[in-house]
Amino acid sequence: MADATVVPDDPPRAAVRTSLQGVVKAFDPIAADGVVLCDTDLAEYELSRTALQNSIFRMLRQGQRVVFDLDERGLATRLRTGSEADMGTPGFPAAHPGDTQHPQGGGLVG
């Protein structure tokens, strides 16, 4: 899981894909290595060294739901939580139905 080319103080990089949803497949708090399984395509993405930087997370548990971005290296970064409504779980009303900037926004209104 470790990426030998990434140093722990590697600066955050620009996101290439944003607001993906998934679950934590594995996380090692000592090495700060982990894998997130994406909901949409079931792809596995390794965590970047900066994935938890400026995040409410300090630890991750297996099966924990997260929203994340992908950087240009294809690593999961900027992990954050989302409510069931935010994540579009069936049976929960949309929290932001008209907000086109929100991951579960309502699209174009008109």
Image: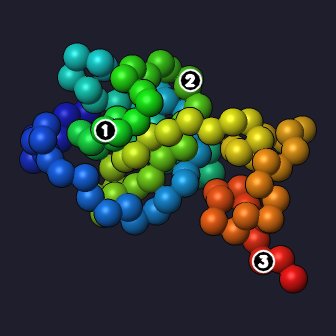
Q: What whole-number distance in Å separates the C-alpha atoms at marks 2 and 3?
A: 33 Å
Which tag, 2 or 3, sits closer to the chain's start? 2
**Mark seen at residue 108:** 3
Which tag, 3 or 1, sits closer to the chain's start? 1
Residue that label 2 marks: 63
Give the secondary structure at mark 3.
loop
Residue that label 1 marks: 53
Residue 85 shown left or right of residue 101 in the figure:
right
Q: Nearer the viewer, mark 2 or mark 3?
A: 3
User: Which residue reaches farthest bottom?
Assistant: 110
- Label 2 neighbour load within 10 Å: few <14, some 14-19, many 20+: few
- Compared with 105, 62 (above or below) is above
Name the residue located 44 percent from the left edge and 30 percent from the top edge.
56
Q: Is residue 47 visible?
A: no
Q: What whole-number distance in Å separates the C-alpha atoms at marks 1 and 2?
A: 20 Å
Which tag, 1 or 2, sits closer to the chain's start? 1
Q: Check if mark 2's residue and mark 3's residue have beta carbons within 8 Å.
A: no
Give the secondary structure at mark 2.
loop
Amino acid type assigned to the residue bearing label 2 in the image:
Gly
Amino acid type assigned to the residue bearing label 3 in the image:
Leu
Q: Is residue 56 visible?
A: yes
Most foreground residue, 73 or 57:
57
- Compared with 77, 103 (above or below) is below
Most foreground residue, 94 or 4:
94
Name the residue located 13 percent from the left edge and 37 percent from the top edge.
8
- Label 1 neighbour load within 10 Å: few <14, some 14-19, many 20+: some
Q: Check if mark 3's residue and mark 1's residue have beta carbons within 8 Å.
A: no
Which quadrant of the view contains residue 92? top right
- Label 3 neighbour load within 10 Å: few <14, some 14-19, many 20+: few
Residue 27 placed where, x, y %?
37, 23
Amino acid type assigned to the residue bearing label 1 in the image:
Gln
- Compared with 98, 80 (above or below) is above
